[in-house]
């Protein structure tokens, strides 16, 4: 199996002995291979391979260790927003929804596959309690925002757009 040759013996054995899932992809294959239908083979351990069949055999045209990359599907375009856009949207939401004061952005992380981002922040709430918050974005919009007071066991949802 060609895919096994790219990994250590342990990981190769896992791939060989574990059930895989086959998914039809929507992005065409590059260059001269664009005449073939692309598929992804994926395993529960995060390994995925972009494959296609010719009249003679199965060919591999890409391997990922982080699941099926968004670039393998045309209907999953990567996000085009900047870190500044995410900071502003998240800050504005917290100021509006929970009257956040002394708000500071702790981090902004775009996901490696450009499928979304996460913003972490700190602020003081209306009762002057130091609080942490976060906003989760997909490719097109904010999905949810949560806040967590230091003494609380769980975060509370302050915005949801599923």
Image (tube, helix red, strand yellow):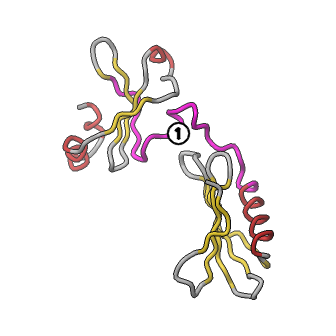
Span of residues in magenta: 59-85
When the figure is inspected, residue 136 is found, relative to residue 29, above or below; the finding is: below
* Image quarter hosting the N terminus: top left
Instruction: Name the element at disc 1.
Output: helix
Of 105 and 155, nearer the camera is 155
Residue 29 percent across, percent down from the top left: 48, 23
Position of 3 compared to 83: left or right?
A: left
Q: x%, y% of residue 122? A: 68, 76
**Number of dots carrying numbers:** 1
| Residue lying at 53% horizontally and 78% vertically, measured from the top left | 154
Residue identified by numbered label 1:
70
Q: Is residue 85 left or right of residue 70?
A: right
Image location of residue 157, percent across then percent down? 62, 69
Q: What residue is drawn where x is 77% and y is 83%?
A: 126
- Using residue 154 as the reference point, say whether residue 50 is left or right of it: left
Q: Is residue 13 left or right of residue 69?
A: left
Q: Quadrant of the C terminus?
A: bottom right
Residue situated furthest top in the rendering: 55
Residue 120 against residue 50 in the figure, above or below = below
Q: Residue at x 23, y 45 (%)?
A: 18
Quadrant position of residue 130: bottom right
Q: Is residue 65 magenta?
A: yes
User: Where, by quadrant of the figure, is residue 96 drawn?
Assistant: bottom right
Q: Residues within 10 Å of mark 1 (few under 14, many from 20)?
A: some
Indicate yes or no whether the magenta region holds residue 87.
Answer: no
Write down the quadrant of residue 125 in the picture.
Answer: bottom right
């Amino acid at each position: 199996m060609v895919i096994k040759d790219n990994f250590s013996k342990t990981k190769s054995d896992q791939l060989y002995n574990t059930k895989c899932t086959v998914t039809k992809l929507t992005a065409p294959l590059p260059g001269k291979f664009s005449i073939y239908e692309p598929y992804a083979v994926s395993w529960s351990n995060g390994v995925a391979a972009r494959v296609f069949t010719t009249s003679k055999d199965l060919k591999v045209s890409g391997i990922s260790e982080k699941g099926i990359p968004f670039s393998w599907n045309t209907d999953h375009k990567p996000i085009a927003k900047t870190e500044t856009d995410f900071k502003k949207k998240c800050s504005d939401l917290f100021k509006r929804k929970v009257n956040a004061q002394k708000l500071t952005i702790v981090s902004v992380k775009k996901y490696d596959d450009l499928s979304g981002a996460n913003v972490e922040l700190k602020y003081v709430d209306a009762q002057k309690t130091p609080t942490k918050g976060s906003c989760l974005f997909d490719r097109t919009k904010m999905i949810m925002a949560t806040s967590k007071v230091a003494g609380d066991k769980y975060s509370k949802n302050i915005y949801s757009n599923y």
